[in-house]
Every structure is written in C-alpha cells, then in structure tokens.
Amino acid sequence: MKKLIIFTCILFLTGCYEFESPPFSEDELKPISKLKLGQTILNAVSEVSVDKNSPIVEFKDKLNTGSKAFEVNDEFLIIQEYDEKEKTWGLMVLMKNSSHILPCVLSENKDIQYPKSLKVTKKVGPMGGHNYTINGLRKDLKSFALKLVKTSPLMCMSIPFENEI
C-alpha cells in the first residue's frame, strides 16, 4: 500500500506545464458547485471516506474550499491552480465516470506545436522528463491551454465512490 501512495504522490508531482500568468480569466471560471458536472463530483467526493494520511484528503480539501473551474464540456472541467512556491499557474483536469472521479495532470506532449506568440522555457524535471514554463498574452495562453489539455496524455488518479444503480 505504501508503494501505491508513493507512486500516486510522484504522479501528481510530475505535472510538467506551468504558466507564468493564468490562462483563464477570473470571469471565465465558475465555482465548481455551480457547474452540473461539478455538483456531481462534489456529491461523489462527499461519499468517499479515506484515511487522513491518504493523498485523496488534499484533493477533497481543495474541492471543498471553493475551487473554480473552466467548463470544457459536460464531462470535462479544468481547474486552474496557483502555486505559491513557484509563482506559477498549473492546470488539473477533472472528469467523472459512473464509478470513479478522475483528477488528472498533464504529461509531456512531445508533438504539440508552440505558437510563436508564446515564450516557452524548457527545463529538465525531477524525474528526467521536461517541465515547461509558458508565458504570453492571455488569449494565446487560453487557446494553447485548451489545445494542450485536449491533446496531451493525462496522468490520472482514479478515486472510487459509491454509486446507486
């Protein structure tokens, strides 16, 4: 079990795209509790009971403290998070199926083309992969963030919940 928790923690530390300014403006983000998928996820999360040392506790706390999301569609939300330490913005994708909640981070997309309007800085990450810091105009950041989320591999943690059939 300890190996699973360590793997899960490593998984979420490997998100490799950061933005120097937020790709989505505050008025484009809605409280999760006001979105249909968000309400469904909040209800499902409230049914999940976990040990206080579980990495799921932090996820539940983040959702319960008024998280806001950009709604891509009925199955897909993007949470934009500010990292105080790094002074950058990151993206987390949130999805749900009939039995699991899926918080996901973006992994490296080697095939994506960067618009010339964006400044992209590439560094070697802690696990040998690459981390990218992206800067530019908000409209370009938003467009690129959406393309990145829709085309990049996602690393997800699957959180089971009770679902009445």
Image (cartoon, grey):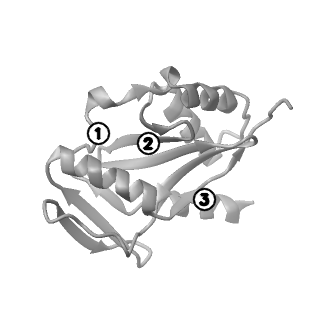
N-term-proximal mark, 2 vs 3: 3
User: Mark 2 to mark 3: distance in Å?
Assistant: 20 Å
Q: Mark 2 points at which residue?
A: 78
Most distant residue in the right direction: 165
Quadrant position of residue 151: bottom left
Quarter of the image that includes the N terminus: bottom right
Query: Mark 2 or mark 3, which is nearer to you?
Result: 2
Quarter of the image that includes the C terminus: top right
User: Mark 3 to mark 1: distance in Å?
Assistant: 27 Å
Most distant residue in the top direction: 34
Q: What element carries label 1?
A: loop
Left/right placement of residue 164 relative to residue 141 reads right
Left/right placement of residue 112 relative to residue 150 reads left
The residue that appears at 30% across and 56% down in the rendered structure is: 18
Query: Mark 3 or mark 1, which is nearer to you?
Result: 1
Residue 8 is tagged as: 3
Viewer-proximal residue among 120 and 75: 75
Say whether marks 3 and 1 touch (CB < 8 Å): no
Q: Where is residue 26 in the image (x, y as percent from the top left)?
A: 28, 29
The residue that appears at 28% across and 70% down in the rendered structure is: 113
Q: Name the residue under label 1.
A: 24
N-term-proximal mark, 1 vs 2: 1
Residue 43 is tagged as: none
Say whether marks 1 and 2 touch (CB < 8 Å): yes
Viewer-proximal residue among 84 and 72: 72
**Amino acid on which the number 3 mark rests in the picture:** Thr
